[in-house]
Structures are given as structure tokens and as C-alpha cells.
Image (tube, rainbow, N blue to C red):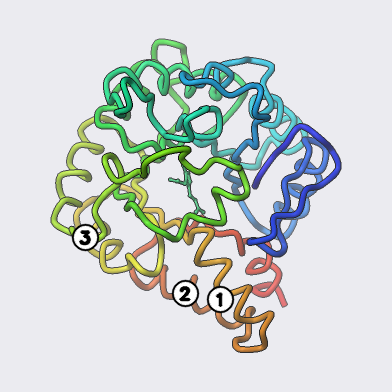
Amino acid sequence: MFVQEAEQETPISSMPGHARLGVLGLVSAAKQAFDLGVPAVALFPAVSEQLKDARAKESTNPDGLLQRAVQALKKALPELVVITDVALDPYSSDGHDGVLVDGRIDNDESLPILAAMAVAQAQAGADVVAPSDMMDGRVAAIRSALDDGGHQDVLICSYCTKYASSFYGPFREALDSAPRGGDKKTYQMDPANTRELFREVALDESEGADWIMVKPGLPYSDVLTRVREATPLPVASYHVSGEYSMLKAASEKGWMDYDAALLESLLCLKRAGADIIFTYGAVDAARLLRS
Ligand code: PBG
């Protein structure tokens, strides 16, 4: 779910059915979802442009938008699992997930920033922190910072095999977070490469990841199956914004039945090996499964 400062909802044109919500709106939408059986929400903040800088300083503000949203959700719905995203992009004036130094992503300079961000989210009450940045070594850095801060019980869902995909476009519109220059190919994975998954899984396991994520969903279901076989950890699949938007757009044109195609997509992800599915269709699916 996307959270913004203003309570007046901002629709997201490429994601029909989704909007940026203020904190109060978020709590009521999360309550509806929870009542329908959705056990968890993943939060992403749309940060105002004036608060963005090169080092994503706003991300550790204890009174920042995301931190307030987490507090409000946990207060209203203590049983709802709240998952927060760890990456610089919503807070970065460069729109990248790590810090840019002399025009290049500096992996190691990014690690303390990511670790501090995760601690701020845990302090606000996040149950699961989900590093989506793809820097090397961030799971270990985050785990040790969380433990030092007394957050041993906060889980890490590592975006383990995350590919440099064109299916993230609608998400970047939702947060206005597209890279201002260059692309994410120096840190996200090459869509042509599956063998690298074994290295990524082994590193994340050894660094202390609790859940392993494969992203995007359907176009990478071969990766999902192989990751499922390669690790005993719970495996999550992220049915990403572009996948959701395709279903919506085709159904708006009358070319496909959204409800059936959504449930089939999620079924296929489960068949391919997902234990957990992140999807923008969660509320729709919960409603369909009940009826
Ligand atoms: C960025 C992040 C992205 C998504 C989740 N976290 C976009 C990106 O890597 O540019 C994409 C999710 C989606 O498309 O639904 N840290």
C-alpha cells in the first residue's frame, strides 16, 4: 500500500484500484483488508520532493511519514503483519536504491544508511523489514543493526533474486521514484541469468535472511521454482505493479476477465513454489476467495 502525507487520496493512473492514501485512509483500508483475511501489508511511502536528498536522510526520521504510518497501523490492528521496504529510492533525490558517489552506486557506503533505515522502521513497530535495494551484504548489516537495537524479533524478508525488470514502471509512477539518471542494472539482476540465484540464496541464508523473495512474479516463475528447491526458508513471490496493471488494462478493454486472471496468476505462483505472495490484487483475491 502506498502512503502519502495528505489525507485526500491521490489515484495512480497506471494502477486502477490503487491510490496513495493518507495515514488515516491507510488504516481504514488496512482494516478492510485484514477483515477479509489479508494477513499482512507492505508499505511504501510517497515522500515529498523537498524531503529527498542524496543520502535519504528522511528515512531515519522517527516522525517521518512511514514511521507514523507503521505506528498507526500497529496501534489500530496489532495482529496485522506490517512489512516495510528498505531501500533509498523513495527518499533519494537520485531515485536510486543505494547512494550515488561520483555518479556510481557505492555499495558499501549504502549499507549503514540501509541498516539505520531498518532500525527506524523496527522502532516504529514494523514486524518485517524487506530490503529491496540489492546491495551486497545488506542483510548482514541490517541483522546486526537490528540485534544491537534490541529488535531480535524483527524478521528480514530479503528481496533475494530481484531482476532489473521493466515491470516496475507503475510502482515508480506511484511513488514518483524513477531513477533520475541511469538504470538499476548495476545492482539488480540480469533477466537472462538464472544461475546467479544460487549465489544470492546462499549469501542471504548465511547473512540471516528469514524469508527469501523472488521478483517479479509470473515472468520469473522458473526462478521461483528453483529458489523453492534451493532453500528451506519460506519463499515469497512478488506479483509486481506491471503484472497487476496488465490485468487491469486488458480487463478494462474487455479483453480478459480480471477476477479469473488474477486468481489464476496467484494460483500459478503458488504452484511454482510461493509460500507467500505480495500482490496488489490481495483485497480482490480475498473477496473472491470468500464468495
Ligand atoms: C524499490 C522497489 C521497487 C519495487 C519494490 N521496491 C522498484 C524498483 O526496484 O525500481 C517494485 C514493486 C513493483 O513494481 O510492484 N526499492
- Is the Cβ of the residue at disc 1 closer than 8 Å to that at disc 2? yes
Give the image location of residue 74, x and y in percent: 69, 32
The crowding category of the residue bearing disc 3, from other C-alpha atoms within 10 Å (few below 14, some 14 to 19, many at least 20), is few
Location of mark 1 (residue)? 263
Location of mark 3 (residue)? 229
**Between disc 1 and disc 3, whose residue precedes?**
3
At 43% from the left edge and 34% from the top edge, which residue is drawn?
96
Task: Tell us which disc is closer to us: 1 or 3.
Answer: 1
Give the image location of residue 243, x and y in percent: 50, 67
Q: Is residue 39 left or right of residue 32?
A: left
> In this view of the protein, can residue 143 be seen by the observer?
no
Give the image location of residue 125, x and y in percent: 61, 25
Secondary structure under badge 1? helix
Whole-angstrom CA distance, mark 1 to mark 3, is 24 Å
The crowding category of the residue bearing disc 1, from other C-alpha atoms within 10 Å (few below 14, some 14 to 19, many at least 20), is some
Whole-angstrom CA distance, mark 3 to mark 2, is 18 Å
Location of mark 2 (residue)? 267
Q: Is residue 263 left or right of residue 273?
A: right
- The three-letter code of the residue at mark 2 reads Leu
The crowding category of the residue bearing disc 2, from other C-alpha atoms within 10 Å (few below 14, some 14 to 19, many at least 20), is few
- The three-letter code of the residue at mark 3 reads Glu
In the image, residue 143 sits, relative to residue 168, either above or below, namely above
Secondary structure under badge 3? helix
At 29% from the left edge and 46% from the top edge, which residue is drawn?
185
